[in-house]
Image (cartoon, rainbow, N blue to C red):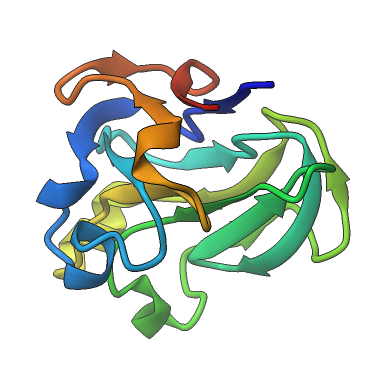
Amino acid sequence: MSLSVLAPLAGKVVAVQDVPDPVFAGQFVGPGLAIDPAREGEVTAVAPISGTVAKVHPHAFIVVNSAGRGVLTHLGLDTVSLAGEGFILHATEGDQVEAGAPMVTWNPAEVEAKGLNPIVPVIALEAQDSALRLTEAGTQLAAGDEAFSWA
């Protein structure tokens, strides 16, 4: 059964290979895509799938569904260096969430103003690249639109 992975926020799709970070571009944590968010104030990133919050940090979260498939959402590059500043958490580890549930509120423009890239990789953990049907790079997505399907 195919898993629909939703866009955690609005923005333009970027191929994961084009993310300016070797870990994501090299697909070391898994395949997926990235979303370049709008720079229009605060944004609340939402859960891309229904499941259990396996990890949550101000800058990133992982939701794992009942079949054991995990999706990582990483809010910006090198944002761990902000030590949580500017991020508001809406979920904690162990929470059961539905796709579309609020996870983290942040401001991509403020992240960019601090010299960091606010691009958001959305990664299918431990997946095969061939198992994903990705939305084409350059496509504008709204939060909750399907970003990719995972066969």
List x then y, in percent, for residue 73: 49, 52
| On screen, residue 50 above or below 2 | below
The residue located at (12%, 61%) in the rendering is 20
List x then y, in percent, for residue 24: 27, 61
The residue located at (44%, 49%) in the rendering is 123
List x then y, in percent, for residue 87: 53, 62
Q: Toward the viewer: 81 or 40?
A: 81
List x then y, in percent, for residue 70: 63, 51
Can you say which quadrant of the picture contains the N terminus?
Answer: top right
Q: Toward the viewer: 38 or 30?
A: 30
- 111 displayed left or right of 56: left
Q: Which quadrant of the figure has residue 46?
A: top right
| On screen, residue 114 above or below 122 | below
- 52 displayed left or right of 136: right
| On screen, residue 139 above or below 7 | above
The answer to whether residue 10 is seen in the rendering is: no
The residue located at (35%, 18%) in the rendering is 141
Q: Which quadrant of the figure has residue 134?
A: top left
- 57 displayed left or right of 50: left
Can you say which quadrant of the picture contains the C terminus?
Answer: top right
- 10 displayed left or right of 24: right
Q: Toward the viewer: 31 or 1?
A: 1
Q: Which quadrant of the figure has residue 91?
A: bottom right
The answer to whether residue 54 is seen in the rendering is: yes
The residue located at (32%, 59%) in the rendering is 76
For the image, the number of numbered tags is 0
